[in-house]
Image: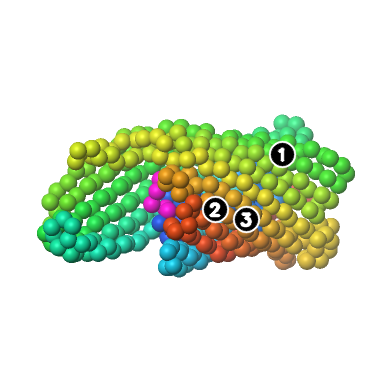
Amino acid sequence: MIKHFLILSVAAIMAVTSSVAQTSGSNSPYSRYGWGTLADEAQGFNKGMGGVGIGARNRSILNYQNPASYSAIDSITFIFDAGISLQTGRWSENGKHANALNSTLDYVQAGFRLRRNLGISIGMRPISIVGYDFYTTTQMNNDDGFGEYTCSSSYKGDGGIREAWLGAGWSPFKSFSIGVRGGYIWGSYEHNASITYSNTNIHSLARLYKANINTYSLNVGMQYGIKLSKKDELTIGATLGIGHDIDSRSTFTNQKMTTTSSLGGDTLVAPKAFQLPMSYGVGFLFKHNGKWSIGADYTCQLWKDCKFPEVNEQNGSYTYSAQKNTFRNRHKIALGAEYIPNPEGLKIRHHIAYRAGVSYSTSYINQNGNDPKTYLVSAGMELPIVNMYNNRSVLNVSVQWEHLAPAQSHTLKEDYLRLCLGLTFNASWFNKWRIE
C-alpha cells in the first residue's frame, strides 16, 4: 500500500508541475522586482481564515505551513489535496486603470500515517511568480539637439520559482509534536527592458536579466496542545525555515541597437547570486466545544541580508554582482475564525464550516520607502461531500479581497478579487477488514 501511495502521489505531482509552470497567475508590475510576487502559503482549509495555520492540526487535513501537524493524520486515511485560484485584478494609478483575469494552481499534496504518531506528506507549490507586460511613452523636447521625438519604454517578464517537498510529523509524547519538511526548489525568470526612440539617429537600448535557480529547502516546526477545560483546547505552534546561500548564477545582457541590427553589447555574469532567507513564525488555534475555532499567526522572513544580483554603472562601465540590502524583512499577521453548527449532527448542514479572516503583510521589496503593504479580507466555507462511496472528503470554497497600497498615494495600487477552490479527497484506504 505504501508503494502504491508513493507512485500515485509522485505521478499526480509530476502531472501538474507543467501546469504550474505555464500559468503565471500574475500581471503585477511589482513582480519585476526580486524573486517576483511571493505566492500565498494558505491552503483550502484556511484560505477563508486569512491563512492562519501554524497552530492548525486535524486528522483530516494536510497542513504544510507546520510539518508538525502531519502527526495528527488519521491512521486509516489517505489524503489527496489540491487547490486553485481564479482572480480578477485591477491596477490603478493617477486616474487610469486596467483589469485582467488570471488563474493558478496553488498547491497539490498527499499524505498518510506511516505508523503510530508518525505521518508523512509530499507535495508541490509555487514560491514566487513573475508575470508582467507594460510600456510607457514620453514626448521629448529639443533639449539634446535631436529635435522633438518620442521615447518608448517596454518592460516584460516571465517565470517563477517552485518547491517540491517531503515532510514528516511525529508525536513523541501526548500533546507535543515536531516535524520537518525538506524540499527541492527550482525555477527561472527572465526580465526584458527596452528603450526605443522615434528618431532613428538615437540608438535604442535593450537589457535582459536571466537566471535559473536550483537549491534545497528545510523547514522545521512544533505544536503543543493544552487542554484548558472539558470543552476548550489551545494549540500553539512555531516554525523555522533555514536560510542559506544558493549556488546559482544570473546573467545580464546590455545591448545598443539600430532599427535594423544590433551594435553589440556586454553580457555579465554574477556567480552565487542568490540567498534563501531564514524565516520563523509563531501562532495559536483555540477551539471551543468543537464548534468555534479562533487563531492568529505572526511570520517573518529575513530578506534584508539576502543576496541578489544588481547592476552598477560607473563612468560608463557596468558591473553585475550579488549584493545585500536589496530587500526588506517581510512581516505578516493573520487572524481567522471558524464556526461549525453541530459537529455531532446527523444532517449535512450541521457539518458545514463557516470561516472568516484578515491579514496584513509588508513587502520584501525595497523601493526607497514606497514598498506596498498588503491588506486581505477573506470568507469561506467547507462543504462535506457525501455519497455511497465516501463521506470524508470536502470542498473548500473561499473568497478573498486583497489590496496592495504603496506608501505614496500617487503610485500604482492593486486590487484583487479572488475565488479559491480546494478539494480534499479523504479515503479510508488502510482499513483492516475482519470476517468472523
- How far apart marks 2 and 1 lie (CA) works out to 25 Å
Give the farthest residue toward the front: 143
Percent from the top left, x then y, of residue 383?
70, 63
Name the residue at 69% across, 58% down: 356
Q: Which of 399 and 358 is in front in this view?
A: 358
Q: Mark 3 points at which residue?
A: 47
Q: Give the range drawn in magenta.
A: 30-34
Of the image marks 1 and 3, the number of the one nearer the N terminus: 3
Q: Between residues 315 and 189, which one lies in front from this camera angle?
A: 315
Query: Is 427 placed left or right of 327 in the picture?
Result: right
The picture places residue 365, in percent across and down from the top left corner, at 45, 45
Verify whether residue 86 appears in magenta. no
Vertical arrangement, residue 322 with respect to residue 104, above or below: above
Q: Residue 374 carries which label?
A: 2
Between 359 and 405, the one lying in front of the other is 405
| Residue at image point 63% right, 62% down | 398
